[in-house]
Image (cartoon, rainbow, N blue to C red):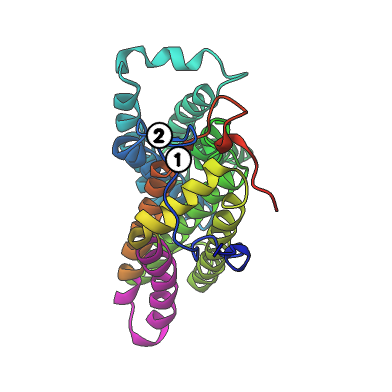
Amino acid sequence: MRVSTRAFEFFPWRRPPEKSYLGKSGLSAQRQWAWLITFAFFFGEVGAGLFVMSSLVQFRWGMLAGLIVAVLAKGYPHLIFLGHPLRFWRALLRPQTSWVSRGFIAMGVFTVFGALYFLMVMGWLGGRGTSLEWVVGGIALGCAFVLMIYDGMMMSFSPALPAWNTPLLPTLCLTFSLMAGSTLVFAVAEYLGLPMAVEVGLVGLAEKVIIVFNLLLVLIYVYVTGRFTEASRESVLQLTGRYRWPFWGGVLLVGLMATLSLSLLSEAMGRELLIAAAMTELIGDFLILFLILRVGVYQPLLTGVRGAKRISK
């Protein structure tokens, strides 16, 4: 008797038993982007998010930490991933068409203006409180914003990988970056009692709102991706099947729900829980990037192959 799949359409992970289409119907998994590029993406988003959130609340040492993480911890593995680090300048030649070029240019400008902005905020360079500081800070924050969406934009321009070819990816990268930045700023500033320009409770409230939004956004991404093409549906089946433990347990339970719970409990049970919240958030942040990269599935080049067809609604 034929099993109806209509009851499983709203939740793609609750599906009747079915075999993977990988190796059949022309579908194949991508394996070029793995651990090294995941670390580059992770450190870039965490560093940029920390710099932005620290700048908004004038948390000076958070700005410095974000700058160092974004420039060094992202830049080095990214150059190694390219295969010829000494030829990285070639990546700068096509900013009108390539997000790789835009990302490298944004990184270079961010390095210079981010450092200048930090020195101005510290009062070590002069220009504190002047319009020049606002201009320098605006350029630095603009470049940090590009770094936060850069990885998602680069992946979303991949029509051969339907699970990546969606505007939801840049949004996910942006909101997870802001979540990492707000969680780290809130945890460190509150735990150590460091001064900021705004009430630390406002940072904590922003963190909780972003966490809830990210939880909804991840579920929307899974739902939408599972209904697009056979290749994207296979990506969802991989994400919620083969990689169900790091996804359900690592991203949703630890990275989002546990982070939110620890942040809420810290108000009554002590600041030490904020450090635990920061750790769980970073775990979820890394895993969501790794899993999205890992479950990328190429759609067939021939439109007549079953895997290239759009799933009927």
Q: Position of residue 130 (x, y in %)?
A: 60, 41
Residue 122 disc label: none
Q: Where does the image place residue 85, in percent across and percent down from the top left?
A: 31, 18
For label 1, count other residues whose C-alpha is less than 10 Å away and answer few (under 14), some (14-19) or many (20+). many
* 257 part of magenta stretch: yes
Type of amino acid at the residue the image marks with label 2: Gln
Residue 78 drawn above or below residue 249: above
Q: Which residue is disc 2 drawn over?
A: 30
Q: Which residue is mark 1?
A: 296
In percent of width and height, residue 252 lies at 43, 65
**Residue 232 lies in quadrant:** top right
Q: Are marks 2 and 1 in contact (CB under 8 Å)?
A: yes
- Up-down relation of residue 177 to residue 15 (above or below): above
Q: Tell which circle, 2 or 1, labels the residue nearer the N-terminal end.
A: 2
Residue 182 is situated, as x and y percent measured from the top left of the image, at 47, 60
Q: Which residues are magenta?
A: 248-274
Q: Secondary structure at mark 1?
A: loop
Report the Cα–Cα distance between label 2 and label 1.
Answer: 6 Å
Which residue is painted at 57% across and 52% down in the image? Answer: 226
For the question of whether residue 304 can be seen, the reply is: yes
Which amino acid type is marked by label 1?
Answer: Gly
